[in-house]
Amino acid sequence: MKAITVKPVWAWAIIHAGKNIENRSWRTHIRGPIAIHASKNLTQSEYEESKKRLPRRWRKELPEYKDLPRGVIIGVAELLDCVTESKSRWFEGDYGFVLKNQRPVKPIPCAGALGFWNLPPEIERKIKRAI
């Protein structure tokens, strides 16, 4: 299974707030189930700036800075497509990875990486047991 590392606020939004587009500056041909990994690093100012960009109804649901999961797999989603335009409120271009069927899992500690990366087999087994 492939995984993608996302800043923690946006990883949370994918899994818990219906964020159905992950914006990137590069395209992908990957399709199918992917793990959503919340990156380890997040400054307080990045948290506050990202929180301001969340739709108002989700701002109060977002965990506090100190409680936001980091350095863990927090869920899975189906990657359906890679688009250059979308009517989704979450699309900001250049490329949008279209996501569906987002599901949380109990946080699983795991190192992340840039781009799409392969999950270690033991982490993949934990995810498959969880979903």
Image: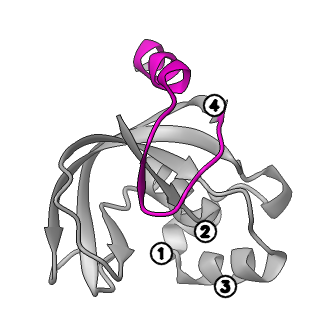
Q: Amino acid at mark 1?
A: Pro
Q: For mark 4, what is the residue?
A: 108
Looking at the image, tell me whether mark 3 or mark 1 is earlier in sequence order: 3
Closest to the observer: 14 or 6? 6
Disc 3 to disc 1, C-alpha distance? 13 Å
Q: Secondary structure at mark 4?
A: strand
Q: Amino acid at mark 3?
A: Glu
Corner quadrant of residue 92? bottom left
Q: For mark 2, what is the residue?
A: 59
Corner quadrant of residue 109? top right
Give the number of the mark in front: 2 or 4. Answer: 4
Q: For mark 3, what is the residue?
A: 49
- How busy is the neighbourhood of tag 2: few (under 14 within 10 Å), some, or many (20 plus)? some
Image quarter of the C terminus: top left
The dot on residue 26 is none
Q: Secondary structure at mark 2?
A: helix
The dot on residue 55 is 1
Give the number of the mark in front: 3 or 4. Answer: 4
Corner quadrant of residue 8? bottom right
